[in-house]
Amino acid sequence: MIIDVISLMPEMFSALNYGITGRAIQNQLLTLNLNNPRDFTRDKHRTVDDTPYGGGPGMLMKYQPLKDCLDDIYNHKSIAQAKEERTSRNNSKVIYLSPQGKRLQQSDLKKLTGWEHLVLICGRYEGIDERLIQQEVDEEYSIGDYVLSGGELAAMILIDGMTRLLPGAVGDNESVVNDSFYDNLLDYPHYTRPAEVDGHKVPEVLLSGNHEKINQWRQEQSLLRTLQRRPDLLDDKNLSHEQLEIIARLKNE
Ligand SMILES: C[S@@+](CC[C@H](N)C(=O)[O-])C[C@H]1O[C@@H](n2cnc3c(N)ncnc32)[C@H](O)[C@@H]1O
């Protein structure tokens, strides 16, 4: 997968050179291109921002450097041609990270991994000129109901979460499938050695070596956690007969 980031602070993305994302970049599962709109300014001060029409506080990212940056990524095709090509072949999507976008979910990350190429636009200041959003942006994503000072951290969150889902990025794919939200359930609790620490023991079943019982316990714990902490997730989940029985029993207990 290829990701082009548009950001005034591309240096921030060095954080992705570590861990799973770093390995995915090294192994060429992920190609990360960093594009700075400042390199596409046309005045000697390299101006990327201006005051908002109508007055009011703050500055806005200007249309032209962002548009020229996008044109460069799309090899200077017209907006219509680039848009037609990128959407009809399902191969490229332009995303603006914005507090006003759709709240990013695990299922969105999964869907986004189906695209060959993503462009992630990171806003700064009060955001970006609305005309660029209307003309060029395919989707807007928010990472939560709070306002950050820039889209870079949000873009990194999207890239990190999505990279985990790229085949081969995480050593053992089973760990991804068991992660919270993958199947609208929270993950079960985990323990590692020693079997007893400060008087606290690992649940007996995990030491039994009986994999069927261990799987049952994990499934039950996963349902229990979801029921206790995020019952809303269960509303959107197709529960099996077995899971419904476990839930009924847990509710009784
Ligand atoms: C200070 S914010 C602008 C907020 C904007 N005035 C508003 O209230 O909708 C600057 C940039 O940070 C990014 N940003 C802030 N909060 C975000 C969030 N929750 N999710 C994704 N991006 C966010 C966006 O790219 C935004 O353009």
Image: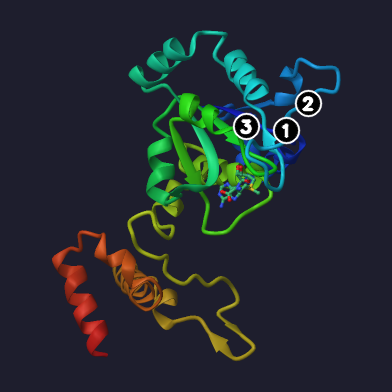
Q: Can residue 96 be seen in this view?
A: yes
Kindly state the secondary structure of the residue where label 1 is placed. Answer: strand
Instruction: Identify the secondary structure beneath mark 2.
Output: loop
Of the numbered discs 1 and 3, the one sitting upstream in the chain is 3
Above or below, 184 relative to 8 = below
The disc labelled 3 sits on which kind of residue? Ile
**Mark 3 / mark 2, whichever is N-terminal:** 3
Tag 3 residue: 25
* Residue 207 image offset from top left, x and y in percent: 44, 76
Q: In this rendering, is residue 77 above or below 145? A: above
Cβ atoms under marks 1 and 2 closer than 8 Å = yes
Note whether 45 is above or below 97 in the view shown: above
| Residue 89 percent coordinates (x, y) | 35, 17
Q: Mark 2 points at which residue?
A: 47
Element at badge 3? helix
Image location (x, y in percent) of residue 52? 66, 37
The answer to which of 223 and 10 lies nearer the viewer is: 10
Tell me where residue 156 appears, x and y as whole percent: 61, 43
Depth check: 111 or 130 in front? 130
Residue 68: image quadrant is: top right
